Image (cartoon, grey):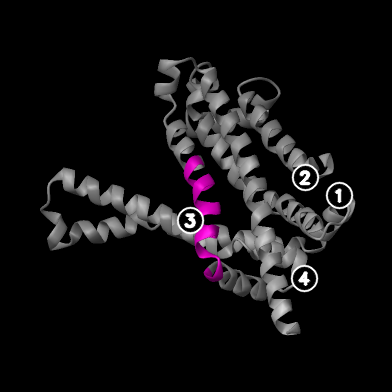
Amino acid sequence: SPRFWIPLAVMGFLHLGLLYGLFLFPRFPAKIVFGPIVKRFWGEAYLHYPFNFVILPFLAKMLRQMLSVFLDFYFIAVMAVLAGNVWHKQQLDNKSAFREALKRFFPLLSYSIILVVILFVIQKMPPYVFKTIYRSPLIANKNPEFLQIVNTTFFYSLKFISVIIKVFFIYTIPLLVLGGHSLLHSVDRSFQLTIRNFFITLFLVLIPTGLLFALEQYIKSPKPIIDDFFPEMVFFVLFGTEVLYLLFSFLVILPITWLYLDSLKKEESLVNV
């Protein structure tokens, strides 16, 4: 049903519309807002073509992170409610789905902030850990190539740890909006459901996260893209990345919600035996 896509369409309109707004930041009237910020942190040159495309990936990443923390969880919760309608073979009701998700807005917001803080702390660990490692007698006298291997291994290990953390929290949104549980209980149950369905849950989270990470690494240093193609190619890659992010948000929450409801059904059948 087209109704099922409405939350994703609204979420996409916000993401892609604001991304296009960033694309226009060197132009009037966006320049009034972004001009002083860009001048202060990057310099006057980055307000002009083609240097504006060099900082566009950073600005786009900041934008997505802001939306992810403060808004995306709500639309994902709406999708979870609609996925529950499909599971129970009920008529899709977008108004009801938006309303049910809105009732749980503050627990959902708390969940989003807690998860982001945990992931932020993990990502900020490397500088402190590296200082400790480099001062170690076992590492200090090693050659630069060995230290680079240590850096790379540690970097990707932290990324994988971040994925594992997301995996253990992934069922929290369906539990909040469909189960009506408290945040603490929802997180606890999410851990239990993840342990019970670990490999399929890991697969559902790891694949899209890995693909998005690869794209983000590719676009992180846009100068080769500008040199090999043309400056506007940076925007096209960012646009494609946002589209994939939106689709993955939908394609992950759908089976995750159904796995939760299937586990709930099995638990109820055991109780009734």
In the image, the segment drawn in magenta is 195-211
2 and 1 marks in contact (CB < 8 Å): yes
Q: What amino acid type is highlighted by mark number 2?
A: Pro
4 and 3 marks in contact (CB < 8 Å): no
- Vertical arrangement, residue 62 with respect to residue 134, above or below: above
> Residue 91, percent across and down?
89, 53
Q: Earlier in the sequence, mark 4 or mark 2?
A: 2
- The residue identified by callout 1 is 94
Residue 163, numbered label: 3
What residue appears at the point 44 percent right and 22 percent down from the top-left corner? 225
Q: What amino acid type is highlighted by mark number 4?
A: Gly
Q: CA distance from mark 3 to mark 2?
A: 25 Å
What residue appears at the point 56 percent right and 41 percent down from the top-left corner? 62
4 and 2 marks in contact (CB < 8 Å): no
- Under tag 1, what secondary structure? helix
Residue 180, numbered label: 4
Is residue 198 shown in magenta? yes
Residue 166 in sight in this render:
no
> Residue 64, percent across and down?
60, 42
- The residue identified by callout 2 is 7
- Under tag 3, what secondary structure? helix
Q: Earlier in the sequence, mark 4 or mark 3?
A: 3
Image check: 10 left or right of 144? Answer: right
Quadrant occupied by the N terminus:
top right
Q: CA distance from mark 4 to mark 2?
A: 20 Å
Residue 154 in sight in this render:
yes
Residue closer to the observer: 195 or 60 = 195
Image check: 55 left or right of 221? Answer: right
Q: Earlier in the sequence, mark 3 or mark 1?
A: 1
